[in-house]
Amino acid sequence: MSNKIKELLLGSIMLIFSVGYFYFSLEINTRSDVIDSRTFPYILSCLMLVLSLWQLANAFFLDSSKQSKGINDKDYATVIKTAFSIIVYIYFFEDIGFIIMSLLFLFVMFVLLTPQIYKPKYPMYLSIATFTSVAIYVIFRYGLDVLLPQGIITVI
Amino acid sequence: MMELFYNGFANVLTPYCFILMILGTFVGIVFGAIPGLSSVMAIALFLPVTYGMDPGQGIAVLIALYIGSVSGGLISAMLLKIPGTPASIATCFDGAPMVENGQGAKAIGVGVFFSCVGTLISIVALIFISPTIAKVAIQFGPHEFFAIAFFSLTMIATLSSGSMVKGVFSGALGLAFSTVGMAPIDGATRYTFGSLELSSGFNILTVMIGLFAVSEVIKMAEGAKNATNTTVAKVDMNVKGMGFSIKELYGQITNAVRSSLVGLGIGILPGIGAGTSNLVSYTISKNQSKTPEKYGKGCIDGIIASESANNASVGGALIPLMTLGIPGDGVTALLLGAFMVHGIAPGPLLFQNYGDLVYTIFVACIVASFLMLFIEWYGMRIFAQVLKIPKHILLPIVFVLCVVGAFALSTRIFDVYAVILFGIVGYFFISFRIPQAPFVIGFVLGGMTEINFRRAMMLSDNDVSSFFLHPISGTFIAITAFVVCSMVFKNYRKSKLNNTIAN
């Protein structure tokens, strides 16, 4: 992706956000006062709108032959799998419980993030994931009185 | 006074109290170092332990916890690029690059030493001029608070290295996120989309964890498979002294004193604390530096600015608490609770009626500063061992701790979702090379800016000139205008010079 396209994309995202922010500011209950709850969001949305147009203008005049640095080195497949793992972990965090979900999450992340030059050590990863999840739960629940979701394990 | 100091030392240096303070400082450092845990949590957990103790000793232990936790944030900020507490956000900017450049021991030594210096400077102010400072602080009204917030927000431009447009947009975005929830004054709901959880807005801790921790994990995932090195960071703690020379120490005196005074000033004002002071001090230091281009790439000036200020805010926050009985932040609110549990009412008569207790607290602050220095410096040898854990094992565990910290805030899964949201925002920033610091400043100061602006306008019947007519706010606005003009002039001269060189 060229630098120009990347910067234009950024400017577009900024513009969409600014317009969205302004649009939803119209739903704020307003009073007849000069300064009310809508004033600050209104000023901010105008500022962001100006900045996004400025960004688009700057991007328009960039040299389209220059490439973005390091874009080809990024492993987006692992990023997507990591993001998916995080979402699943959080989604089932309360229902399934902290210990089980953290154990599964840690194990999956250890395997996902192991560099290709190393072989994943599944038994070790499982042991570390189990120990860490239980230890964190016990320390926080009984040592620091922080409630963490029990989920389906109700004996602890 | 000397007799009171002597009694204070006698109270604090009893074996029982001293051992508890060592433990308190160590636990505080651990709480500060783990992202997701905070000073408030540490003190809330240990407050019941102090109920049965002598008031002076109980409060001494809590102060040791406070000082340890504020400084402990630098450990994860430098080693993991994730600030342990909001007070160490700015420490990340130069601490982490120094560790990457093989100067980890120097970065840590500088951070720990000047944390101690910042605390001591604020304690001197607390001991000798706290009633005077409190009298000035009480004159701060909405106009003055707005002027300070406005001044701090304009510093965003200083932090916008590279692209001013992106930096200012980042700051505006932070301000925008701070408007989510119930509006100040009239309570109108903004950007809640009918959600009850969004009515209370976002917490700074979720913003910090998401922006720094989650984005770091996702960033790591980008290059995980192709990595050849699994070490998080290498820190060789076998250095002479604390890793920096006497010449470097002398060269940083101005920076340290200025940053400590900024931290002290900000710490005194209720509602603003170490979370803001480290960022404001960093931007002022960068603005005043002859080599601002070195900031963000690994220079000790940035670390000193951040760590002196955040620890100086500790003494600053104790000033309104002890002289006026007004807590400045969550931690001092808990300390106020500690006073009241022991049947002591902080305020103007505290110094008169409880002289022994007051000087015990002063001595506890001094002793805790040195305990923090020794425990953190020598304890780094233990912390450095944690770095031997491979990255792909350590970072997911840190992420789980961050999730626990976010959940523990209010026992709501919403806060964890908020962490994910800000993680996405953080990754977006990294991908498009948008600076994160302005976002944090905008978020932290947004609420304060708006509420004080609206209050000031209500008090002055929508008369904008009132900001210039109040002496303190007028002074701050004049300083802001001067700083903005000098920045614009500097940029103009720089671009003219660049054009001349190009021609």
Image (spheres, rainbow, N blue to C red):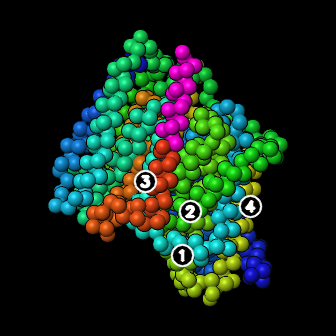
Report which quarter residue B125 is drawn in. Answer: bottom right
Whole-percent x and y of residue A110?
51, 33
Residue corresponding to mark 1: B135
| Cα–Cα span, label 4 and label 1 | 30 Å
Quadrant where the image shows the N terminus of chain B: bottom right
The picture places residue B482, in percent across and down from the top left corner, at 50, 48
Q: Chain of mark 3?
A: B
- Range of residues picked out in magenta: B486-503
Q: Which residue is mark 2?
A: B265
Query: Looking at the picture, which amino acid does disc 2 mark?
Result: Gly
Chain at tag 1 = B
- Is A134 placed left or right of B425 in the picture? right
Element type at marker 4? helix
Is residue B456 visible from the viewing direction of this image?
yes
Say above or below: B359 vs A12.
Answer: below
Question: What residue is shown with label 3?
Answer: B150
| Disc on res. B370 | 4
Visible residue check, residue B233: no
